[in-house]
Amino acid sequence: MEARRLAAAMTWVDARMFGAVSGAALLRGARAGAAARASGERGVRVEALVALTAHWNAVSRWAATALLFGAGEGARKRAKLLRFFVELAGELRALGNWSGLFAVVVGLGCPALAALRETWRLLPARDAALLRELEELCQPVANFRPYREALAKAGDAGTFALPYMAIVLKDLQAIEEGNPDKNAKGLKSICFRIIFKRKKK
Protein backbone atom coordinates (compact mmCIF):
# COMPACT_ATOMS: atom_id res chain seq x y z
CA MET A 1 0.00 0.00 0.00
CA GLU A 2 1.31 3.46 -0.84
CA ALA A 3 2.08 5.85 2.02
CA ARG A 4 -0.67 8.35 1.14
CA ARG A 5 -3.46 5.76 1.20
CA LEU A 6 -2.20 4.22 4.43
CA ALA A 7 -1.95 7.65 6.06
CA ALA A 8 -5.55 8.38 5.06
CA ALA A 9 -6.72 5.06 6.53
CA MET A 10 -4.79 5.66 9.75
CA THR A 11 -6.25 9.14 10.06
CA TRP A 12 -9.78 7.78 9.64
CA VAL A 13 -9.19 5.24 12.42
CA ASP A 14 -7.56 7.83 14.69
CA ALA A 15 -10.40 10.32 14.12
CA ARG A 16 -13.00 7.73 15.11
CA MET A 17 -11.06 6.86 18.27
CA PHE A 18 -10.68 10.53 19.16
CA GLY A 19 -14.40 11.02 18.58
CA ALA A 20 -15.12 8.29 21.13
CA VAL A 21 -13.40 10.35 23.85
CA SER A 22 -16.02 12.63 25.38
CA GLY A 23 -15.35 15.85 27.24
CA ALA A 24 -16.32 14.05 30.44
CA ALA A 25 -13.73 11.35 29.70
CA LEU A 26 -11.06 13.99 29.18
CA LEU A 27 -11.97 15.58 32.49
CA ARG A 28 -11.90 12.23 34.30
CA GLY A 29 -8.57 11.38 32.67
CA ALA A 30 -7.05 14.69 33.71
CA ARG A 31 -8.32 14.41 37.26
CA ALA A 32 -7.18 10.80 37.54
CA GLY A 33 -3.74 11.73 36.25
CA ALA A 34 -3.43 14.70 38.60
CA ALA A 35 -4.55 12.61 41.58
CA ALA A 36 -2.16 9.81 40.63
CA ARG A 37 0.77 12.20 40.43
CA ALA A 38 -0.14 13.69 43.81
CA SER A 39 -0.60 10.34 45.57
CA GLY A 40 1.85 8.18 43.65
CA GLU A 41 -0.92 5.66 42.98
CA ARG A 42 -2.41 4.53 39.66
CA GLY A 43 -5.29 6.62 38.39
CA VAL A 44 -8.78 5.52 37.40
CA ARG A 45 -9.02 3.83 33.99
CA VAL A 46 -10.91 5.79 31.36
CA GLU A 47 -11.61 3.14 28.73
CA ALA A 48 -11.76 5.40 25.65
CA LEU A 49 -8.43 6.96 26.61
CA VAL A 50 -6.93 3.56 27.42
CA ALA A 51 -7.94 2.30 23.97
CA LEU A 52 -6.52 5.39 22.27
CA THR A 53 -3.23 5.06 24.16
CA ALA A 54 -2.96 1.35 23.37
CA HIS A 55 -3.55 2.09 19.69
CA TRP A 56 -0.88 4.82 19.69
CA ASN A 57 1.62 2.48 21.34
CA ALA A 58 0.84 -0.25 18.81
CA VAL A 59 1.51 2.09 15.87
CA SER A 60 4.76 3.26 17.42
CA ARG A 61 5.94 -0.31 18.06
CA TRP A 62 4.91 -1.33 14.55
CA ALA A 63 7.18 1.29 12.99
CA ALA A 64 10.13 0.09 15.04
CA THR A 65 9.60 -3.68 14.84
CA ALA A 66 8.81 -3.66 11.12
CA LEU A 67 12.25 -2.20 10.46
CA LEU A 68 14.00 -4.47 12.91
CA PHE A 69 12.35 -7.75 11.96
CA GLY A 70 9.97 -7.33 9.04
CA ALA A 71 12.21 -6.16 6.20
CA GLY A 72 14.25 -9.30 5.84
CA GLU A 73 18.01 -9.30 5.83
CA GLY A 74 20.01 -6.60 4.15
CA ALA A 75 20.43 -2.88 4.64
CA ARG A 76 18.93 -2.02 1.23
CA LYS A 77 15.60 -3.65 2.04
CA ARG A 78 15.51 -1.95 5.41
CA ALA A 79 16.40 1.41 3.84
CA LYS A 80 13.50 1.01 1.42
CA LEU A 81 11.12 0.32 4.30
CA LEU A 82 12.60 3.19 6.30
CA ARG A 83 11.92 5.50 3.37
CA PHE A 84 8.31 4.30 3.33
CA PHE A 85 7.86 5.16 7.01
CA VAL A 86 9.37 8.62 6.48
CA GLU A 87 6.95 9.19 3.61
CA LEU A 88 4.11 7.92 5.79
CA ALA A 89 5.04 10.38 8.53
CA GLY A 90 5.11 13.20 5.99
CA GLU A 91 1.65 12.26 4.72
CA LEU A 92 0.30 12.12 8.27
CA ARG A 93 1.54 15.65 8.85
CA ALA A 94 -0.02 16.81 5.59
CA LEU A 95 -3.35 15.36 6.74
CA GLY A 96 -3.07 17.06 10.13
CA ASN A 97 -2.82 13.77 12.00
CA TRP A 98 -0.39 14.79 14.73
CA SER A 99 -1.21 11.75 16.83
CA GLY A 100 -0.15 9.40 14.05
CA LEU A 101 2.87 11.55 13.21
CA PHE A 102 4.15 11.42 16.79
CA ALA A 103 3.63 7.64 16.90
CA VAL A 104 5.66 7.01 13.74
CA VAL A 105 8.42 9.48 14.61
CA VAL A 106 8.78 8.06 18.11
CA GLY A 107 8.92 4.56 16.64
CA LEU A 108 11.66 5.56 14.21
CA GLY A 109 13.57 7.02 17.15
CA CYS A 110 13.81 3.61 18.82
CA PRO A 111 17.38 3.21 20.17
CA ALA A 112 17.73 -0.20 18.53
CA LEU A 113 17.23 1.36 15.11
CA ALA A 114 20.13 3.74 15.66
CA ALA A 115 22.44 0.73 15.46
CA LEU A 116 21.43 0.09 11.83
CA ARG A 117 24.04 2.52 10.53
CA GLU A 118 24.18 1.12 7.01
CA THR A 119 20.40 1.39 6.70
CA TRP A 120 20.46 5.04 7.71
CA ARG A 121 23.37 5.72 5.37
CA LEU A 122 21.31 4.41 2.43
CA LEU A 123 18.35 6.68 3.21
CA PRO A 124 18.17 9.32 0.43
CA ALA A 125 19.17 12.82 1.51
CA ARG A 126 15.71 14.21 0.74
CA ASP A 127 14.03 11.69 3.04
CA ALA A 128 16.64 12.22 5.74
CA ALA A 129 15.97 15.97 5.61
CA LEU A 130 12.21 15.38 5.86
CA LEU A 131 12.66 13.12 8.86
CA ARG A 132 14.82 15.73 10.61
CA GLU A 133 12.13 18.32 9.97
CA LEU A 134 9.43 16.05 11.40
CA GLU A 135 11.59 15.18 14.42
CA GLU A 136 12.04 18.88 15.15
CA LEU A 137 8.27 19.36 15.11
CA CYS A 138 7.92 16.58 17.69
CA GLN A 139 10.71 17.72 20.00
CA PRO A 140 9.65 18.48 23.60
CA VAL A 141 11.76 21.67 23.69
CA ALA A 142 10.02 24.70 25.21
CA ASN A 143 7.00 22.58 26.14
CA PHE A 144 6.56 21.26 22.58
CA ARG A 145 6.55 24.74 21.13
CA PRO A 146 7.10 23.73 17.45
CA TYR A 147 4.15 21.34 17.62
CA ARG A 148 1.94 23.81 19.46
CA GLU A 149 2.65 26.57 16.95
CA ALA A 150 1.89 24.29 14.01
CA LEU A 151 -1.33 23.08 15.65
CA ALA A 152 -2.40 26.65 16.44
CA LYS A 153 -1.75 27.65 12.83
CA ALA A 154 -3.99 24.82 11.64
CA GLY A 155 -6.68 25.96 14.05
CA ASP A 156 -6.47 29.56 12.84
CA ALA A 157 -6.79 28.36 9.25
CA GLY A 158 -9.76 26.15 10.14
CA THR A 159 -8.07 23.03 8.77
CA PHE A 160 -8.48 19.50 10.13
CA ALA A 161 -6.09 18.45 12.89
CA LEU A 162 -5.87 15.57 15.34
CA PRO A 163 -3.74 16.53 18.36
CA TYR A 164 -1.34 14.33 20.26
CA MET A 165 -3.50 13.14 23.16
CA ALA A 166 -0.60 12.79 25.63
CA ILE A 167 0.02 16.54 25.40
CA VAL A 168 -3.71 17.30 25.66
CA LEU A 169 -3.90 15.31 28.90
CA LYS A 170 -0.71 16.90 30.17
CA ASP A 171 -2.22 20.35 29.69
CA LEU A 172 -5.51 19.35 31.30
CA GLN A 173 -3.68 17.92 34.30
CA ALA A 174 -1.83 21.22 34.68
CA ILE A 175 -5.18 23.05 34.62
CA GLU A 176 -6.62 20.61 37.15
CA GLU A 177 -3.68 21.03 39.52
CA GLY A 178 -3.50 24.81 39.18
CA ASN A 179 -7.19 25.75 39.37
CA PRO A 180 -10.03 25.02 41.80
CA ASP A 181 -12.97 22.93 40.59
CA LYS A 182 -15.39 25.72 41.45
CA ASN A 183 -15.21 29.44 42.03
CA ALA A 184 -16.65 31.38 44.97
CA LYS A 185 -20.13 31.22 43.41
CA GLY A 186 -19.99 27.46 43.04
CA LEU A 187 -19.56 27.53 39.25
CA LYS A 188 -17.28 25.05 37.50
CA SER A 189 -13.81 26.27 36.61
CA ILE A 190 -13.87 28.55 33.57
CA CYS A 191 -10.99 26.51 32.12
CA PHE A 192 -13.05 23.34 31.97
CA ARG A 193 -16.12 25.16 30.69
CA ILE A 194 -14.01 26.41 27.78
CA ILE A 195 -12.72 22.89 27.13
CA PHE A 196 -16.22 21.40 27.05
CA LYS A 197 -17.41 24.19 24.75
CA ARG A 198 -14.60 23.46 22.27
CA LYS A 199 -15.12 19.70 22.51
CA LYS A 200 -18.80 20.07 21.60
CA LYS A 201 -17.84 22.00 18.46
Image (cartoon, grey):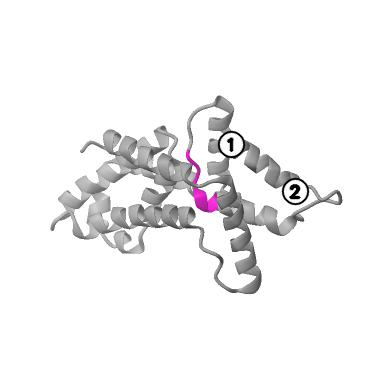
Let me know if residue 49 appears in the view: yes
Q: Which residue is mark 2?
A: 188
Q: Is residue 73 above or below residue 160?
A: below
Q: Nearer the viewer, residue 86 or 115?
A: 86
User: Label 2 amino acid?
Assistant: Lys
- Magenta segment: 162-167
Q: Residues within 10 Å of mark 2 (few under 14, many from 20)?
A: few
Answer whether residue 108 is visible to the viewer in this image: no
Q: Is residue 54 left or right of residue 78?
A: right
Instruction: Report which quarter residue 99 is drawn in.
Output: top left
Q: Residue at horizontal 28%, vertical 38%? A: 6
Indicate the amino acid at tag 1. Lys
Residue found at x 34% / y 41%: 10
Residue 191 found in image quarter: top right
**Compared with residue 22, is residue 29 higher up or lower down, i.e. above or below?**
below
Badge number at residue 110:
none
Cβ atoms under marks 1 and 2 closer than 8 Å: no
Residue at the (48%, 35%) spot, across then down: 161
Q: Position of residue 163 (x, y in %)?
A: 50, 43
Q: Residue furthest top?
A: 157
- Location of residue 195 with respect to 63 vertically, above or below: above
Structural distance between the alpha carbons of marks 1 and 2? 17 Å
Query: Furthest-front residue in view?
Result: 186
Say which residue label 1 marks.
200
| SS at mark 1 in the image | helix
Residue 166 part of the magenta segment: yes
Q: Residues within 10 Å of mark 1 (few under 14, many from 20)?
A: few
